[in-house]
Amino acid sequence: MIHTWFRQHFVRSIAGALLVLFVTSVFPGQNARGQTGSDLAAVKQQADQLISAEKFTEALPLIERVLTAEPGNAHFQFNLGFALIGQGTVTKEPAERKAIRIRARNAFIKARDLGEKAPVLDAVIEGLPADGSDTNGFSPNAQVNDLMNGAEALFSQGKLDEALLGYQRALELEPKLYYAALFCGDVFTQKGDFPSAEIWYQKAIAIDPNRETAYRYSATPLMKQQKYELARDRYIEAFIAEPFSKFSVAGLNQWSQVTKTPIANPNVDIPVEVKIDDKGEMQINMTANMSGGGNDGVGAWILYGGTRIEWHKQKFAATFPSEKVYRHSLAEESDALRSVISMATSDKKVKVLNASLAKLKQLNDAGLLESYILLARADDGIAQDYPAYRDKNRDKLRRYVLLYVMAAGGK
């Protein structure tokens, strides 16, 4: 779920938020054809420094020099994509700008094919339209939109103070313009003024606390200062704001890689497959033997399918009278899992719950079963229930991510 606007403008700030950490740990050392290794190494270093400084237009010719010598260099194919997006912000002719964006997307795809593992890469590729098309811009107000586009072009050239004036002027005209406040924060991050960056990121968060971007970008200064626990909390807030965005997931993965801390949802095996056939009937398939021993609770899974069939036939319509078409809901999934937990724990023949049932019971006892379902098992139907749950239960979502996801699935 990537904002339509973000498809056009996200790469400039992604570079500052993630690449600045990435380039310090990944530096290719291949020798080049046509120039000495030391010459090319100097070009590589300068190009990486320019990308880190978000001076994309200056970096572009240097990156192209490297790739002429080393077309298979995944790191510089990755950097090429960022540099091209930066070049696109200063390109006025629409057809040329479109061609640049297509080339940028292809560079990211090639980087991935060559083995680039940056956490944000898949999200970047997904966020760029394959046809290189323009999107709706920053604002329906033409003056504001022009100010933002002009500021973006200045930022891509490293003209930070001039860019800042443009963003601030746009925000004066449109006080709820999220990306104007966000990009002011980026300017101060790039200038190394982290306290001022934090002020502006918090202004963006206040404008829209349900967008992940400002939380995630605000983690960058904290990561640079090695304040890893504080950065972790910002990445968690980004994930809670938009858990189905590849960008918020990439933020968690970035933190995990830098801190060498494994992250994961709890490992729960649900031995039941549920499908809707061509006739609209729900089909249940048990993928485990329910007749064995009976002393670990596995037989209780028979209730999972039965509960879901009941929801499909009647409970969904009764629970969601305004919705005319059945969907898999959070209420259905939590009801089905709780029915299994209840049966397994009340069966006197059960001596010790198997690992999956024990984990589900632990989550349920902690009041975090819904959080687990939404953040680990959500399909398209369940995801529709997320905004309403998040609005009332941010604390539970936060607790689940901290105690389970950031602890490699929990104890």
Image: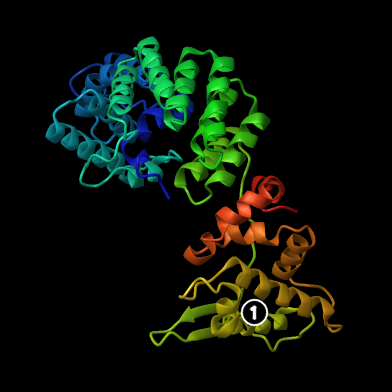
**Residue drawn where x is 76% and y is 78% of the image:** 297
**Residue drawn where x is 16% and y is 36% of the image:** 99
Mark 1: give few (<14), some (14-19) or many (20+) Cα within 10 Å. many
Image x and y of residue 361, in percent: 76, 66
144 shown above or below 196: below
**Residue drawn where x is 27% and y is 45% of the image:** 129
17 shown above or below 379: above
Left or right: 72 as drawn, with respect to 335: left
Q: Which residue is mark 1?
A: 304
Q: Tell me, yes or no, if residue 61 can be seen here.
A: yes
Left or right: 293 as drawn, with respect to 82: right
Image x and y of residue 360, in percent: 72, 65
Image x and y of residue 190, in percent: 46, 17
Indicate the secondary structure of the residue bearing disc 1. Answer: helix
- Callout 1 amino acid: Tyr
Left or right: 27 as drawn, with respect to 69: right
Image x and y of residue 49, in percent: 38, 17
Question: From this viewpoint, which residue is outermost toward the right?
Answer: 348
Q: Tell me, yes or no, if residue 296 can be seen here.
A: no
* Quarter of the rendering occupied by the C terminus: bottom right
Viewer-side residue, 46 vs 333: 333
Residue 255, by quadrant, is top right
Left or right: 45 as drawn, with respect to 403: left
**Residue drawn where x is 65% and y is 36% of the image:** 233
